[in-house]
Image (cartoon, rainbow, N blue to C red):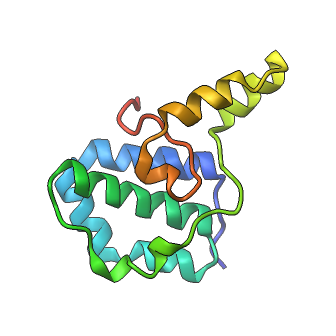
Amino acid sequence: MEERSDFEIFKSNICHKLKEKGDLLFLKNMLESGEVIKLFEKNWHPECFYLLAMIDYLSKENGISLYKGYDPLRTGKMEEIIYPAETIMLCYLKKSDKLKKQALKEAIPEFLKYNIVETDIRNVY
């Protein structure tokens, strides 16, 4: 049985793959691999929707039509909003939801559609 990594690690790994491969090769690899469907079939919905949002966002950014094979998945979303762990931690420490509200305003629409707050996919080291 495959071990599931923490969602924050998953997101970081995806962003590093994007940086390494570039938009078009990343899109090609993800579409050819069928990774979105594999994640959905494992019931790993946060990872599935994150990757689908990434694919949709990169497609829009590069003027590429959305892959129709994922249309049935595009009607779903996470039940609750998923914020970055850093945002949750800072809100807890500051005893304020101000940073959550700010992150929500700055969220990339393709991610927010699936109730995932993501503000920057390109700033990885």
**Which residue appears farthest toward the left when viewing the image?**
63
Residue placed most toward the observer, 75 or 30: 75
Rendering coords of residue 86 (x, y %): 66, 30
Rendering coords of residue 43 (x, y %): 64, 77
Rendering coords of residue 110 (x, y %): 41, 53
Rendering coords of residue 77 (x, y %): 58, 65
**Which residue appears farthest toward the top when viewing the image?**
94
Please give the name of the residue rendered at 75% of the width and 27% of the height, measured from the top-left corner: 97
Please give the name of the residue rendered at 24% of the width and 54% of the height, measured from the top-left corner: 60
| In the image: residue 83, left or right of residue 37 | right
Q: Quadrant of the N terminus?
A: bottom right
Task: Tell me where residue 16 sits by quadrant.
Answer: top left
Classify 108 as above or below 6.
above
| In the image: residue 62, left or right of residue 16 | left
Classify 7 as above or below 90.
below
Q: Quadrant of the C terminus?
A: top left
Please give the name of the residue rendered at 33% of the width and 52% of the height, measured from the top-left corner: 57
Please give the name of the residue rendered at 70% of the width and 22% of the height, measured from the top-left corner: 98
